[in-house]
Image (cartoon, grey):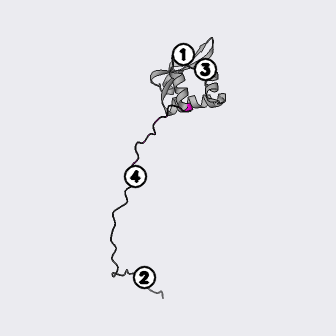
Amino acid sequence: MTKPKSKPNTATRSTGRKFVKTAPRKRPTPVSSKPAARPDTKHARIIAMLRAPAGGTIAAIMTATDWQQHSVRGFMAGVVRKKLGLNLVSEQTDKGRVYHIRDGKAAPTAASRTKQAA
């Protein structure tokens, strides 16, 4: 024969104590979701160089920031193109390859590749 299953023991709470709900703490609200751009950073200097009519070469950006060549290229691809979504174009000139930021949003990469292939 098997024993009948017993009900699990449930703890009973004492009704003697009363808890008073306090008002939730107010958290400080952030001023804005995006931090204000500081004008004297390396990023701001590079963006200003690229927005200038003359544009900027990798060598010029390297001397302005004390970065290595691969760091400048990574910044232009990762921050300028992807994060900021700016339209970065490059042109081959007698000074070498010059990079500019053109007005308007950057074209999606797939669409620009199909235009280049055609």
For marks 4 and 1, give the CA distance: 45 Å
Q: Which of 65 and 84 is in front in this view?
A: 65
Asked whether the residues under the numbered discs 1 and 3 touch, taking CB atoms below 8 Å apart as contact, a structural biologist would say no
Badge 1 marks a residue whose secondary structure is loop
For marks 3 and 4, give the CA distance: 44 Å
Q: What residue type is labelled 3?
A: Thr
Q: In the image, which disc is placed on residue 54?
A: 1
Q: Read off the residue under disc 2.
A: 9
Q: Which of 111 and 57 is in front in this view?
A: 57
Q: Read off the residue under disc 4.
A: 28
For marks 2 and 3, give the CA distance: 77 Å
For marks 4 and 2, give the CA distance: 45 Å
Q: What residue type is labelled 1?
A: Ala
| Camera-nearest label, 3 or 4 | 4
Q: In the image, which disc is placed on residue 57?
A: 3
For marks 1 and 2, give the CA distance: 81 Å
Q: Which amino acid does label 2 sit on?
A: Asn
